[in-house]
Image: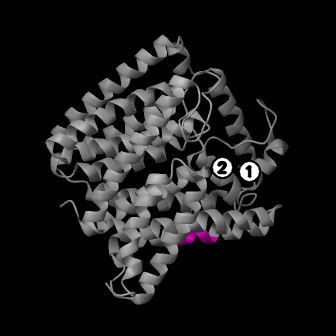
């Protein structure tokens, strides 16, 4: 291997490190994401391999991504906090979009895609181990996070909802790897799945449960085998969740329409809608929602907060135009995955697992802060890129 080919060869290894360390270290995410982008830039400069983004199936996603970035930049012109907006543009959204671009190149390599799915399985097992240690001792082993005041595990994260979001996207990927693996590895992965489901239930995050169930129905409901797996998975999800909630005495509250958490979200959404109606076109500026929140406060906790609806927050910060471009970016990407979904699940289960993970994340973002949490956002754009690369390469056809 020559020095010119080295950056391209490094990409899968850097991607594996990123996915393995992502749940445990924000610093690792920032460093490895930058290294991935730099290695990709050197690989592209070498020009030895054609870019996966030249494929017509990804052209609309590329155009939507560019439009979204330009509208985010335009929102800085009307921002009352231009420095904060510029930092978010360069340090967050530009990095996230480039991370997706790089991961498409990695995902287009079939062997790398399958290997990275296995890395995700191993990382999720480590996360579950951290969460179980926290449950048993009251404090995490690696990150030393304390058990939530309500007794809800958070593992390497500070918030149970963040752990639930991570498990929500890793469970279908681990399941996909298990279906396509040999018998001994399948047994190991099934044991890991049981543990992951147990931790998923213990987070008591209803939004993540509903998002995973809805995404599974959407992706796997296209053929008979998929429908059988969906029904089995939903039964496990419903039964396990009901048992955990019933033991905690909060079964009714978890699905109540007017519990404290739901009411609080309604207040935040109302504030976001007031921001949007005040400046509908370019918004208040990227990364300014919390800075403007108290000026539009309508109730609940009177402190700077996220909207807990990524799409409303996007519209408040970048305007309706920015939200439209963001939805177009997600929509064109998801449409590419939908068209690539195979008819025979058993032969292409890993790809289906990634598609479910992407769909679940997009759905849950309507009730949480997924796109505004660094580790969660980096995970999503990485998984989306890998899945798009696999779809482009027709690695599962």
Element under disc 1: helix
Q: Is residue 224 above or below residue 88?
A: above
According to the image, label 2 marks what residue? 313
Where is mark 1, residue-wise?
Answer: 289
* Residue 282 percent location from the top left of the image: 70, 62
Are dots 1 and 2 in contact, CB under 8 Å?
A: yes
Residue 68 appears in the picture as rendered: no
| Numbered circle sitting on residue 361 | none
Residue at the location (39% across, 34% down)?
Answer: 196
| Residue plotted at (44% across, 39% down) | 167
Question: Residue 311 location in percent, x, y?
Answer: 59, 49
Front in this rendered view, residue 378 or 186: 186
Q: How many marks?
A: 2
Local packing at callout 2 (Cα closer than 10 Å; few below 14, some 14-19, many 20+) is many
Q: Is residue 332 magenta?
A: no
- The residues colored magenta run 66-70
Image quadrant occupied by the N terminus: bottom left
Question: Which quadrant: the C terminus?
Answer: bottom left
What element does badge 2 sit on? Answer: helix
Residue 236, image x, y percentages: 32, 25
């Amino acid at each position: 291997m020559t020095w010119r080919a080295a950056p391209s060869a490094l990409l899968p290894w850097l991607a594996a490190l990123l996915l393995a360390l992502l749940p445990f270290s924000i610093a690792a995410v920032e460093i490895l994401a930058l290294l991935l982008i730099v290695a990709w830039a050197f690989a592209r400069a070498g020009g030895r391999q054609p870019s996966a983004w030249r494929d017509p199936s990804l052209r609309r996603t590329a155009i939507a991504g560019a439009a979204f970035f330009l509208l985010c930049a335009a929102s800085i012109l009307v921002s009352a906090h231009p420095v904060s907006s510029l930092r978010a543009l360069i340090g967050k959204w530009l990095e996230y979009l480039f991370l997706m671009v790089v991961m498409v190149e990695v995902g287009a390599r079939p062997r790398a895609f399958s290997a990275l799915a296995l890395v995700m399985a191993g990382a999720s097992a480590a996360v579950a181990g951290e969460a179980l240690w926290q449950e048993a001792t009251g404090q995490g082993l690696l990150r030393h996070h304390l058990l939530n005041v309500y007794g809800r595990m958070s593992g390497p994260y500070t918030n149970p909802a963040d752990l639930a979001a991570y498990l929500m996207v890793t469970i279908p990927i681990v399941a996909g790897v298990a279906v396509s693996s040999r018998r001994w590895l399948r047994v190991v992965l099934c044991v890991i799945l049981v543990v992951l489901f147990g931790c998923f239930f213990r987070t008591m995050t209803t939004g993540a449960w509903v998002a995973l169930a809805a995404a599974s129905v959407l992706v796997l409901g296209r053929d008979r085998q998929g429908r059988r797996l969906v029904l089995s998975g939903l039964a496990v999800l419903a039964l396990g969740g009901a048992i955990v909630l019933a033991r905690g005495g909060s079964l009714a509250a978890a699905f109540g329409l007017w519990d404290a958490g739901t009411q609080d979200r309604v207040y935040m959404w109302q504030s976001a809608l007031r921001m949007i109606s005040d400046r509908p076109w370019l918004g208040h500026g990227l990364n300014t929602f919390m800075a403007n929140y108290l000026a539009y406060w309508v109730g609940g906790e009177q402190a700077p907060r996220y909207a807990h609806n990524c799409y409303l927050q996007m519209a408040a910060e970048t305007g309706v135009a920015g939200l439209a471009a963001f939805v177009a970016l997600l929509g064109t990407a998801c449409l590419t995955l939908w068209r690539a979904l195979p008819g025979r699940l058993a032969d292409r289960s890993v790809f289906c697992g990634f598609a479910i993970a992407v769909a679940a994340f997009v759905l849950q973002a309507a009730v949480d802060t997924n796109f505004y949490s660094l580790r969660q956002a980096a995970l999503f754009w990485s998984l989306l890129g890998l899945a798009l690369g696999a779809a482009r390469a027709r690695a599962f056809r």
